[in-house]
Every structure is written in structure tokens, then in C-alpha cells.
Amino acid sequence: MELLALVLIPFIAAMLLLAFRPAAMARGIALVSTLLSFALVLWLWYSWNGSMVIGVSHDWVPAWGMRFVLGYGGIGLLMLILTGLLFPFIIGTGYKQPVGDPSLVNALLLFCQSALFGVFLAQNAFLFYVFFELSLIPIFFLLMFWGGAHKRSITIRFFLYTLLGGLALLFSVAYVTLQTPVPHSADFTALAALDLPMNVQVWLFWTMFLAFAIKMPIFPFHSWQPETYTMAPTQGTMVLSAVMGKMGLYGIVVFLFTIVPEGALHWSSWVIGISLFGALYAAVIAFRQNDFKRMIAYSSMSHFGLMCAALFTWNAYGISGTLYQTLAHGVLMVCLFYIVGAVAQRTGSTDFAGMGGLKTKMPRMALLFMFVTANAIALPLTQSFVGEWLMYNGLWQWNNWTAFAGVALIVLGAIYMLYAYQRVMLGPDRAIDVTDADDEEHFFLVPLIAITLLVGIFPNVILHVVDGPVQQLLNSFTSLP
């Protein structure tokens, strides 16, 4: 029942917010809900024995292979930790950003969290697809009602892109379910047992990969991302970059690597190539941006390109490093977009031209930003250093030249992040009246910075969660023709 409760806690809290509209208490209720969910995730983590856990298993529409099955292994548990950890901070961001209807905003965020928990708990492909699509609906309304300039056209484009990916995923799920013995089953265990012909796996790979490539996104399925991230309210951008994008990486592992492994191996060189090209492209474009928020959007795209490339290296370093980095990237993106929002709130803009010299009036914020920047450029003892080191080792084992592309990425990442810090905090004083970081901003950023240092120093806290599942995955690869 704990797994069902994990989906229902945010859902029930969201329904209460919509029913009673407690404007003054909306953020507090939402925050308490996310903290309860996180406490439950910690309990699941503490009680996990290293094997697959199935908590709920009921027939739904058995004639179509649809069953309501909730469970988790090590990789799913990591995604639950990511979602449970970050949503209290995402909800907490709203205390600095008053909006017209806090009850509706927080209800939409909680609906999204409920769907995300469902995605990472689903052990049936049709159930996965349902939650996968449900997570899109609250974000759509959040962008449409509280987005910035050109929000309607940008939100519609985002919706159409993700709808296209969702339809491709639905087709894939229906096709592979019909390949199972009668009575057909869409449970992941039944789909993983399929032995699809190579010629089928070669084309089926792309129908599945399309959905997950759009969700991350990676080149060339990325054109919705920069405008959407820039236009979205800060909380919406945090959800999209820190948590929802990870559905793409998770989907690759549970769908592509288990259902069409030969197809994934066949196309791995292509995926690594386009992912690294897109990562390098995004890093160069990030350096050329004059808008702080847009620069962070491109940096997120660059990180996703590197993670996707490392995931397809088919070795323990690359896969473990990518999974580890999902948490590191999520924490980093929440920190960076929070700083963007805090600086924009004081200067009235996210344009670099209106910033500069802020460290003289904001020394505490400058120090907090410096710690976040250290994590962003993967300095040793930070969380990102561990993940990127593992991913570069994975790329090196795959091909030495791909590792050089990884090195170029870390250099470019350091350049654009340090340049951003210089344009925001250093240089001549702009003589604008701004206030320094207050207690609330310390309460938000300091715990996240502490997490990046703690997990950077003790990476096995996270790695032990995924080591076993990754080894099982690699063992299954060795049996491929």
C-alpha cells in the first residue's frame, strides 16, 4: 500500500486545494504534502533489500494486456528519490513568486508529482504510458496560464512535440504487447521475455526512442526546449528540466534496453554521435546567449546530450554514471533556475545587460552562486564531478574519440558558467538598488548545496542503489548475438 500512497498523497492534496481554494494556506498544504511523500520515499529506500519490489498488482483491462502494477527496482528507486527530494524545493520556490491563484498553481504541481511517481512505479507498459501522458497535462496548463511572452504559441508547440512522442510510444506499446503469448500482457516482465527478430527491433527502436528523445530533449528533437524553458514560470522550468526530462532516460532503460536490446546496440553509435553533437552544439549556443535563463536552458540540453551518449556506451561506467548524474543534474537545475529567479526578481530582467557588479550588494548570494557554479563545472568533491567522471570513463571505453568530445564539453561548460558568473556578479557596480540573499533563500539553497557536497564526497550513497540493476542489465547484454 505504500506505493499506492505515494501516488495518492500528492493527488489527494491537489484535489483538496481545488475543492477548498485555501489561497493563504495553499503553498503550506502543498509543501506538507511533498514532505510526506519524501518521507515515504526515504522509508522505501531504507527498507529496500536490493531486489525488485511489487507493491500493487491488479487486473485493469486484461483483454488488452493492461494491468495496474506498481513496483520498483534500484533504478526506479533512484527516480523516486529524485522526485521526492526535489518537489519540496520546487513548491518552496513559490514563496518568492506570488501568483494570482496559488491554490491552482500548487494543485497543478502536485498533480504532476503524482503522475511522475506513477511513471517511475509503473510495471506495465500501458500504465507507464498513461502516467507518461498525464504528467503533460498539468504542465501544459501551468505554461499556458503563467508563462511569459508568446506563451500560447510556445506551449502549443511543446504540446504537439510531446504528443507526437506519446503517440509513437503508444504504437510501440500496442505492437510489442500483441507479440506476447495469448492472453497478451504489457507487464515489463512479459515484454522483456520477448525475443523479437532483429529486423523488427531495428525499426521499433526508433518509434520508442522518439518519445524519450523528445522528452529529454536531445538533438534534433530539441527545438521546443529553449523557448519553453525561457518562457515558463520558474517552478515549471524546474519541473521540466530537473524531473520530467529524466523520464526520457528512465524510459530508455526500461523500454529500449530490455525490449529491443539488439536494436539499441545496432543504433548505439548513431545515438552517441547525435547526442554528443547536440551537447556540443548546445554548449556553444549557451555561451552566446545574452539571457541568463536561456543560457541555463541550453546548458541543460547539453547535459542531457552527454547523459544520453554515456547511457548507450553499454558499460558499467557509462550507465551508472548517467543514472547517478540524473540526481546531480536535477539538484543543479533547481539551484540554477532558483538563482535566475532570485536575480531577476531584484533586477527586473533575466538579461545579462542589466546585471553585473552585484557581488558588492549581494555578497551572500554571490557566495551561494559560487558554490552552485562549482557544482555546475564539476569541480572535485561536488556531485557532478562523480557523475561526469564516470560518464567520461564510459565514453573512453566505448571509443577514445568520444571521450575527447566529453572533455570538450567540460571545458565549454566551465567557460559559459564562469562567464555567466562574471556577467552577473563581477565587473563594475551597476548602481542598482538590490538586497542580499535573505533567510528564506539560504533555507532553500544551503540544503541543496549541502547535498551536492555530501553526495560528491560519499557517492556510494547513490551508486549502491543502481550498481546491482546495472550489472544485471549488462549481464543480459552479454547474451546478445
Image: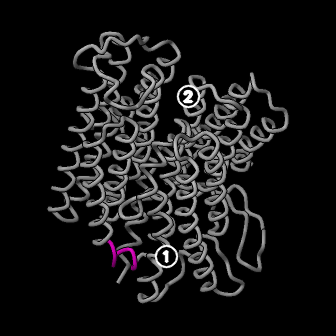
Q: Is residue 85 visible?
A: no
Location of residue 341 with respect to 123 vertically, above or below: above
Residue 45 percent coordinates (x, y)? 56, 42
Residue 91 percent coordinates (x, y)? 60, 32
Count of residue discs: 2
Label 1, label 2: how many angstroms apart (C-alpha)?
Answer: 37 Å
Per the image, label 2 sits on a secondary structure element best described as helix
Residue 51 percent coordinates (x, y)? 55, 56
Location of residue 39 with respect to 465 vertically, above or below: above
Q: Which mark is residue 207?
A: 1
32 to the left or right of 464: right
Q: Residue at x 37, y 51 (%)?
A: 301
- The mark that comes first in sequence, 1 or 2, is 2
Q: Is residue 194 magenta?
A: no
Per the image, label 1 sits on a secondary structure element best described as helix
Which residues fall within the magenta stretch?
262-268
Amino acid residing under circle 2: Thr
Q: Is residue 267 magenta?
A: yes
Q: Which mark is residue 93?
A: 2
Q: Quadrant of the C terminus?
A: bottom left
Q: Is residue 165 visible?
A: yes
Q: How is the image coloured?
A: one colour
The front one of 94 and 47 is 94
Residue 233 percent coordinates (x, y)? 54, 37
Q: Residue at x 45, y 70 (%)?
A: 209
Q: Residue at x 41, y 49 (%)?
A: 226
49 to the left or right of 368: right
Amino acid residing under circle 1: Thr
Instruction: Tell me which corner region of the image, top left, top right, bottom left or bottom right, holds residue 235.
Output: top right
Question: What secondary structure is the magenta-colored segment mainly?
Answer: helix
The front one of 138 and 309 is 138
